[in-house]
Image (cartoon, rainbow, N blue to C red):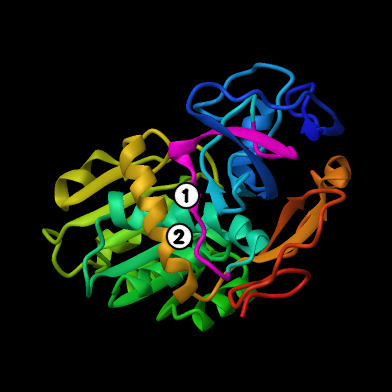
Amino acid sequence: MYAAVVHALGQPPRYESVPEPVPAAGEVVVEVLAAALYPLVRSFASGGHYTGGDALPLVPGFDGVGRTAAGELVYIPGLEPPHGTMAERVAVPATALMPVPEGLDPVAVAAVMNPASSAWIALRERGRLRTGESVLVLGATGNAGRAAIRLALDQGAGAVVAAGRDPEGLRVAAELGAHRTVRLAGPDEEIAAAFGAAAADVDVVLDYLWDRPAELALDGILRHRADLTRPLRWVQVGSAAGPDMTVPSAWLRKADVGFCGSGLGSISGDRRAAALRELLARLPALAPTTAAVAVPMAEVEAAWESPMRSGARCVFVPAGGDEPASGSWETVGDREPA
């Protein structure tokens, strides 16, 4: 069979022949129909992820959608190097497989599950969003940020504030239902003041940026918060702006601010699996926020570093396989999310 194979950390994988997977006890072999490329996958492939290693060669791909020998469409969650999902077939523990709701497109599901699950777990498990509470999405113009807006509203958020650099992305965020937006442009004082005006009384912050934007957001919120004893639950999900944030000690003494992270090590495997199953069950009722661009696996080396337009995600499909069956919930091809 064929797979994408990384031979040097940080270098694009090559499409080449590899041995067939040999299932261990309790595992089954699944035919992979779609595996998405996103920052987590690249991080594992570079050896830079905090849970990853440096074993080579490795097959990248963290999750995907496949078909069992019995013909069941399933979601494949959480494979880590060196055995990833960017292969024609993978061996997976049978108990880890999750059924994909009938009628959904494998490519669309593969594209949306990582950004949606990052938001879903952050909201449900770490932020513990309650009906009527308000949410600030810091980094709302990316795939995960857009999913966070949609899912926060789906879970009953009373208001959502979207923050990001890209004005077109903020326009899309407003179309998705964000009540207010903050553009991360201009002098620091103006950005902090904008957060104070738009998000002073939010209950939950989903932070995909960290670093200086997070500092400005927290500063603006605390300067303008009407009741500093009102709990502010800050969930750190990503660090697109940088790995470090400076928090003056006085900020943590003058207000009820709680920080936590949401990532692969922040909740148990059982809780993560339960959350993913919940999300899969919700997908048919949610309009997608990520456009999927299907790319044959044979083109993985060229496509690995190719930029995707905003809102789109590269999804690798079998090089010689049939086109995935389309369903009522799909965003396949070079199209913007609805």
Residue drawn at point x = 64 percent, y = 24 percent: 82
Residue at 68% from the left image edge and 26% from the top image edge: 21
Task: Check the image and report above or below for 59 versus 184.
Answer: above
In this rendering, the answer to whether 56 lies above or below 241 is above
- Which amino acid type corresponds to the residue marked 1 in the rendered image? Met
Give me the residue at 81% from left, 33% from top: 1
- Report x, y in % for residue 328: 60, 78
Kindly identify the residue that appears in the image at 32 percent across and 39 percent down.
Answer: 270
Q: For the magenta stretch, what is the residue range? A: 84-103
Q: Does residue 69 appear in this view?
A: yes
Residue farthest toward the left in the current orientation of the protein: 229
Residue 311 drawn in magenta: no
Q: Quadrant of residue 336?
A: bottom right
Report the side of 77 relative to 6 (left or right). Answer: left
In this rendered view, identify the residue nearer to me: 234 or 126.
126
**Can residue 244 be seen from the camera position used here?**
no
**Which quadrant holds residue 295?**
bottom right
Q: Which image quadrant for residue 307?
A: bottom right
First in residue order: circle 1 vs circle 2: 1
> Badge 1 is on which residue?
98
Compute the Cα span from label 1 to label 2.
8 Å
According to the image, label 2 marks what residue? 280
Asked if the magenta segment contains residue 98, the reply would be: yes
